[in-house]
């Protein structure tokens, strides 16, 4: 009897141990699952995110980047050869009483392509160099009255300082290097084509006071010159 009782006691102990092991295993599995869920739900740390959506380093709060897209890349003048519109032959373009509009669509595409190639190449942004800084003096529309590239982006304002063009820095440059850096804005390449896309960086309102002071000085000089002409001093 003692042997039978001892054997039963051992079996009970083994079963209790197995149940405890299973319980611990379930708890561990639960903990692992909870840890995994927490890891998935946790947001990525700032160090794992890129510093800027565009891949550029972050800018100071008073600076911004913008991209201008020129409406046309070649100036339209009297020497420009414009292809004539395609003439539709209604006799051959008529099928079952319906006139084909393929030629009209082709003409529309040709006109759109011509407008992308030839036309107003301006950016609609008048700049002035004062004290070695390139300052936005005025934004103006296209020659046909439509909004210019500088107006369309909606962020450039009078008094903003242009800091770089396509990563070419314009800060603290001698005047010859500064003028060279500004060439993409108003000078075509050897083939007569202007840059279509320009990536610019500005400092907001950093040149406004300098611009106002310069304009006031110019106004005073203009008034003085006018008085001299009236009095016959010139």
Image (spheres, grey):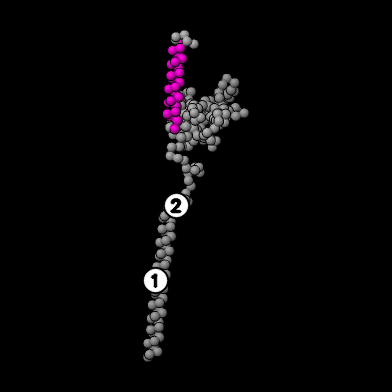
Q: Nearer the viewer, residue 127 or 228?
A: 228
Mark 2 Cα within 10 Å, few/some/many (few <14, many 20+)? few
Q: Position of residue 207 (x, y in %)?
A: 45, 30
Residue at x 43% of width, y 22% of height? 216
Residue at x 62% of width, y 28% of height? 190
Label 1: which residue? 23
**What are the residue bounds of the magenta stretch?**
206-229
The span from disc 1 to disc 2 (Cα, nearest Å) is 35 Å
Choose top left, top right, bottom left or bottom right for residue 3.
Answer: bottom left
Residue 211 in magenta?
yes
Disc 1 element: helix
Q: Nearer the viewer, residue 231 or 45?
A: 231
Disc 2 element: loop
Q: Position of residue 71 (x, y in %)?
A: 51, 29
Label 2: which residue? 45
Choose top left, top right, bottom left or bottom right for residue 181.
Answer: top right
| Residue 100 visible, this angle | no
Q: Position of residue 33 (x, y in %)?
A: 42, 62
Tell which circle, 1 or 2, labels the residue nearer the N-terminal end: 1
| Residue 3 visible, this angle | yes
Left or right: residue 23 versus residue 73 is: left
Q: Nearer the viewer, mark 1 or mark 2?
A: 2
Confirm or deny contact between disc 1 and disc 2 (CB under 8 A).
Answer: no
Q: Position of residue 222 (x, y in %)?
A: 45, 17
Residue at x 47% of width, y 44% of height? 52
Q: Nearer the viewer, residue 102 or 53?
A: 53
């Amino acid at each position: 009897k003692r042997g039978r009782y001892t054997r039963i006691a051992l079996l009970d102990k083994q079963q209790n141990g197995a149940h405890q092991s299973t319980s611990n295993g379930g708890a561990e599995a639960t903990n692992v699952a909870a840890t995994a869920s927490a890891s998935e739900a946790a947001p990525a740390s700032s160090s794992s995110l890129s510093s800027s959506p565009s891949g550029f380093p972050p800018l100071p709060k008073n600076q911004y980047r913008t991209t201008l897209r020129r409406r046309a890349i070649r100036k339209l003048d009297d020497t420009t050869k414009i292809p004539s519109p395609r003439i539709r032959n209604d006799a051959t373009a008529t099928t079952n009483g319906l006139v084909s509009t393929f030629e009209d669509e082709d003409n529309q595409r040709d006109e759109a392509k011509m407008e992308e190639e030839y036309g107003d190449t301006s950016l609609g942004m008048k700049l002035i160099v004062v004290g070695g800084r390139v300052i936005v003096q005025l934004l103006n529309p296209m020659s046909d009255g439509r909004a210019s590239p500088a107006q369309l982006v909606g962020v450039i304002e009078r008094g903003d300082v242009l800091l770089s063009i396509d990563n070419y820095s314009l800060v603290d440059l001698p005047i010859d290097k500064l003028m060279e850096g500004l060439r993409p804005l108003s000078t075509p390449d050897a083939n007569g084509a202007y840059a279509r896309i320009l990536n610019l960086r500005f400092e907001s309102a950093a040149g406004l006071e300098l611009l106002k002071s310069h304009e006031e000085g110019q106004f005073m000089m203009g008034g003085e010159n006018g008085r001299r002409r009236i009095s016959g001093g010139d």
